[in-house]
Image: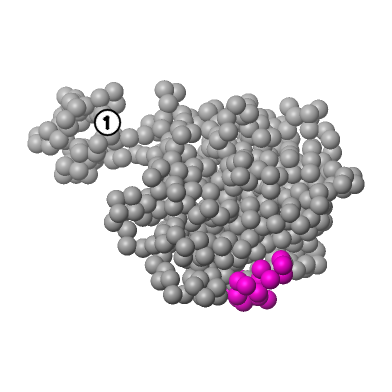
Amino acid sequence: MNETRKFDTKVQYLKYKVLREVAKQAWNDTLLENLLDIPKIIVPGKTPTMRCCVYKERAILAERVKIAMGGRSDRSNIIEVIDIACDECPAAGYEVTDSCRGCLAHRCEDACKRGAISFDHNHVAHIDKNKCVECGQCAKVCPYSAIANRKRPCQAACKIKAISINENNAAQIDDKKCISCGACVYQCPFGAISDKSYILNVVDLLKKSQLGKNYKLFAVVAPSISSQFTYAKLGQVISGLKKLGFHTVVEAALGADMVAQAESKELAEKGFLTSSCCPAFVDYTRKNYPTLIPHISHNLSPMATIARYIKETTANAKVVFIGPCTAKKMEVQLDTVKPYVDSALTFEELQALFDSRDIDITALEEDVLDNASYFGRIFARSGGLSDAVAEGLKEQGLDDFELHAVSCDGIEECKKALTLKSKNLLKENFIEGMACVGGCIGGAGCLTHGAKDKAQVDRYGQEAMEKNILDAISILQ
C-alpha cells in the first residue's frame, strides 16, 4: 500500500521517514558513518519539497535526526522544539484585521487599560505588542469583530499553557508546566515540535537478544492498538512484533485488570481517589494540585504493573512498552517505574521499526493476543477505567461501597474536577483522569488520530476470552 496512507498528515510521514532511516542505519551498524547523509537520503536532489530551499530543509531534517536519536541530553523533557523549523507561524496574540472600518466610536481604545491601541490617519486601529497583555477586551467590544486572536496551533493545543513565544518568535516550552502529553506535537502544522525517540534503545535491545544475550525481550502493547494499523489485522501486528525479535507479546490490558482490582480495593478503603493510569494526568495533578497528591492512587500504571510482574516472574526479562502515549516516555524515567520498563515506543515508531526491517505485516499469518479481560481492554477509552473499578468492587464483594466516578475526558475536564475537589466542592469520590480527549485512543503517538471510536474499543474488549477481572488475573497466580 501507499505508505503515506498509514498516517494522518504529511508531518507524521516526514517524522516516520526520519525514524525509519535512523533505525535502518542502526540495524546495519552504519548510523555514525552515514549520519550526515540521512537528510540527503530523505530529500535527494536539489529541489525542496517543503521549505524555501533544500539547504534549510536538510538543516531541519538534521535536527529531526537528533531527536530520533534521543534528543538533547541536557533536558529531561520528552517534548522538544526545533527552533529552525518554527518560523512560519504569524506572531501570536490579538491583531487588527482588514475588517476594521476606522469607526469613530473607538470602543477598542476605551476598553484597553494599557493604552496599547492607537490609530493611523485612516482611523484604523493598531495594537502595540509591547503594551498588550492579551486580555481580549478590545476584541469583545469591537462592533465589526475586526480584532482576532491569532493563537498559534501549538498554544491552542496546550490547554495547560506550557507554551509561550520567545524573543526569536519561536515556541518555547516551560518544562515546569509541561506534562509531556504531546498535544502540541500533533497540532504543529510544520512539525516544529516533536517527541524524543528511544527507537535506538529498542533496536539495541532487539539486536542483542538476537545475538544470544541472556535475556528475554517482552513487548507490552497498549489496548488502544486495536484502533491502530487499520490496514492490517491485529494478529498480523503481533506476528510482526515477534518477527522483529520480541520473545513474547503481552497486553498492557492485563496490567489494567490488575490495577482495576487493586484500585477498587484502595478506593473502598480510603473513600476517595484520583487515578494513576495516565502519567500526564498524574504529573498535572502533582504540579498544580499538591494538596491532592495524597489522594493519587498508590498503584502503578497498567504498563508498569504488568512489567513488574514480568520481571518478578521471568529471569533476565527486559520490557519495551508500545502505545499511543508520548507521556509514557516520561513515565519510564521515574524511579518507581525505571526498574520495570526498559524503553517505550509509540505506534508511529513501531511502524518505522517494521519498515526499517522491510516487514510487511499484511503478508504475515495472524498470531494471538488474548490474555486480558473486557474490562482491562476498555481502559483505552475515556470512562473505561471507571467501568473497570465498578466491576472490581463488585467482583471483590465491595459493592456496598457506592462508587460515584467522574470520567474526565481531556485535560480541561481534569482541571475542572481537580479544582472542585481542591475546594471541597466535588461530590464524586473517584476521579478518572485522561489527559487526551477520548482517552488513550486520542494519544499523540497514534498512527491515526481520527480513530477515537469508543464503540470499537468496546468491541475489542468483547472479543476477550476472559469476561471478568478475576478470571483474567487468575492466570498470573
**Residue 260 sits in quarter:** bottom right
Q: Is there any visible trace of residue 440 in the rendered image? A: yes
Highlighted magenta segment, given as a residue range:
459-477
**At numbered mark 1, what does the secondary structure look like: helix, strand or loop?**
loop
Residue denoted by label 1? 133
Is 260 located above or below residue 316 in the figure?
below
- Measured from the top left, where is residue 222 in percent x and y? 63, 58
Can you give x and y, in whole percent of width and height, for residue 151 in the image? 37, 39
Residue 103 in the image: above or below residue 292: above
Left or right? Give the position of 204 relative to 81.
right
Q: Nearer the viewer, residue 415 or 450?
A: 415
Residue 471 falls inside the magenta stretch: yes
Residue that appears at 73% across and 27% down: 36
For image coordinates 16% across by 30% down, the residue present is 113
Query: Hey, what amino acid is under mark 1?
Result: Val
Quadrant where the N terminus is found in the figure: bottom right
